[in-house]
Image (cartoon, helix red, strand yellow):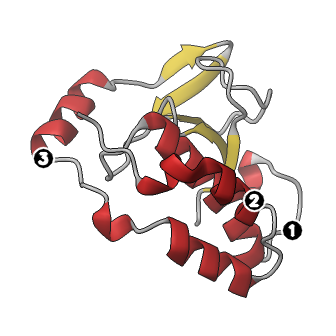
Amino acid sequence: MVYVPSFMNYLDEYNKQKRNIHTVDDWVKFRNEWFDESQWPLKTPFQLTEESLRKRGPKKIAGRLWVYTTYMYDISPEARYEFFSALYNIGHPLLFNYSGPKTAENGWNQNCPYCEISTNEIGDDTCPVCTRKLLYSRVMD
């Protein structure tokens, strides 16, 4: 059974607080309150091996080349997507000084933590598998 972090049980309050993040201090407080990663189970070596065998790639999806990603925490896909969405869309812009366009040449990729896929062929912002909004992340982060 996949673990669902507690923040997923309080999405109304979580989203309310998320909308009020404007500074690094706000982000740190929010992350400490909502993302207690020490409570999240790690994937076992067996799970990681199974994923590695199943996630062979790269794979062409909707005209772009995608690779599979693996995350260390064994949490629900919904929670994984929400966690990385907050991290990439709120936390990283506050913590890191990005400049220039979001291109592969500048170290950017698009990924869907829900589907565990990623591409450096920047294009449509919609995941071709689940239709969630793709997240931009920097390869260097």
Q: In the rendered image of this protein, does residue 58 appear above or below residue 88?
A: above
Distance from the alpha carbon under mark 2 to that under mark 3: 37 Å
Q: Assign a secondary structure to mark 2.
A: helix
Q: Position of residue 89 (x, y in %)?
A: 73, 57
> What residue type is disc 3 on?
Pro
Distance from the alpha carbon under mark 1 to that under mark 3: 38 Å
Characterize the local packing of mark 3: few (<14), some (14-19) or many (20 or more) Cα atoms within 10 angstroms: few
Task: Name the residue at the bottom extreme.
Answer: 25
> What residue type is disc 1 on?
Ser
Q: Position of residue 76 (x, y in %)?
A: 40, 38
Q: Nearer the viewer, residue 121 or 129?
A: 129
Characterize the local packing of mark 2: few (<14), some (14-19) or many (20 or more) Cα atoms within 10 angstroms: few
Q: Earlier in the sequence, mark 1 or mark 3?
A: 3
Q: Nearer the viewer, residue 116 or 24?
A: 24
Q: In the rendered image of this protein, does residue 17 appear above or below residue 41?
A: below
> What residue type is disc 2 on?
Lys
Q: In the rendered image of this protein, does residue 132 appear above or below residue 19?
A: above
Q: Is residue 82 visible?
A: yes
Mark 1 lies on residue = 99
